[in-house]
């Protein structure tokens, strides 16, 4: 090998892949949310501790909101939610997103209506074909600036095609899609986001294919069926 070419090959095939960041904390369980001392969760831990890997808009800039009281029904927030807020999910936490208006201390709106979201930018797995997540409420999945069409495959579980983004660095954004005209600024809950590859063929399909190949082989082995001579 040409020694002048070796460093270039190392950069392209070794160093470049090592620099590609992967999505992290897609099940929202990597964070640490301390106890509030009263049997609940601390409502304002540092965001980086509670939801590592993710960015957000809306809500408190210095922490993550776990619960909101009636006095703040229109205040947008994003943050960790106890797992039981999303029936059927696994792990300790899910993500909740609440739309609304930023307000002053008296509750008067001081901002336009905010559709809360969380996001992170990383490299989509090279074999990714679909994205799957668990969710309740109206939500939108945006990848690389494109809205991904999501379909409910089982109750509360949704999938969408992301194959065009496989291997690309892209921003993943999960958005509360409820409109400002809806009362009480509905909250959505999201959990267990996964990138899935194209599924392997099932055993029954593989067995059927092998049987078909075997049958064709037998026919070729037997050769043509000899004709029966006609008696004169």
Image (tube, rainbow, N blue to C red):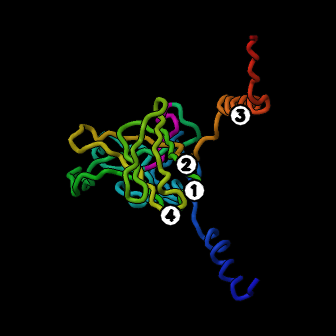
Label 4 residue SS: strand
Residue 46 in view in this figure: no
Marks 1 and 2 close (CB-CB < 8 Å): yes
Dot 1 alpha-carbon crowd within 10 angstroms: few under 14, some 14 to 19, many 20 or more? some
Residue 96 left/right relative to 125 = left
Label 1 residue SS: loop
Say which label, 2 or 3, has the lower sequence index.
2
Marks 3 and 1 close (CB-CB < 8 Å): no
Q: Residue furthest bottom?
A: 4
Pointer 4: what residue?
169
Q: Relative to 21, is 229 above or below?
A: above
How far apart, in angstroms, are the residues tagged by discs 1 and 2?
A: 7 Å
Say which label, 4 or 1, has the lower sequence index.
1
Residue 39 position, x and y percent, is 54, 39
Front residue of 13/193: it is 13
Pointer 2: what residue?
195
Which quarter of the rendering shows the C terminus? top right
Which quarter of the rendering shows the N terminus? bottom right
Residue 229, image quadrant:
top right
Q: Relative to 229, is 34 above or below?
A: below
Start-end of magenta stretch: 79-87
Q: Residue furthest front?
A: 232
Residue 36 position, x and y percent, is 52, 46
Answer whether residue 28 is magenta in the image: no
Dot 2 alpha-carbon crowd within 10 angstroms: few under 14, some 14 to 19, many 20 or more? many
Pointer 3: what residue?
213
How far apart, in angstroms, are the residues tagged by discs 2 and 3?
A: 34 Å
Q: Nearer the viewer, mark 3 or mark 1?
A: 3
Say which label, 3 or 1, has the lower sequence index.
1
Say which label, 4 or 2, has the lower sequence index.
4
């Amino acid at each position: 090998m040409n020694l002048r070419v070796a460093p270039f090959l190392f950069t392209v095939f070794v160093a470049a892949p090592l620099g590609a960041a992967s999505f992290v904390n897609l099940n929202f369980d990597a964070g640490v949310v301390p106890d509030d001392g009263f049997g609940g969760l601390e409502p304002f831990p540092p965001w980086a501790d509670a939801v590592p890997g993710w960015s957000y808009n809306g809500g408190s800039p210095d922490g993550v909101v776990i619960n909101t009281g009636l006095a703040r029904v229109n205040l947008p927030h994003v943050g960790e939610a106890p797992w039981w807020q999303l029936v059927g999910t696994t792990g300790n936490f899910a993500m909740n997103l609440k739309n609304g208006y930023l307000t002053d201390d008296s509750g008067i709106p001081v901002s336009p209506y905010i559709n809360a979201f969380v996001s992170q930018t990383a490299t989509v797995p090279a074999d990714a074909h679909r994205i799957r997540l668990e969710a309740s409420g109206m939500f939108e999945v945006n990848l690389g600036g494109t809205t991904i069409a999501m379909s409910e495959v089982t109750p509360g579980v949704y999938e969408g095609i992301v194959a065009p983004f496989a291997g690309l660095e892209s921003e993943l954004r999960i958005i509360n899609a409820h409109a400002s005209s809806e009362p009480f600024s509905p909250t959505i809950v999201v959990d267990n986001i996964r990138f899935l590859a194209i599924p392997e063929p099932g055993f029954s399909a593989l067995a059927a294919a092998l049987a078909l190949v075997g049958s064709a082989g037998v026919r070729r082995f037997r050769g043509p069926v000899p004709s029966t001579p006609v008696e004169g």
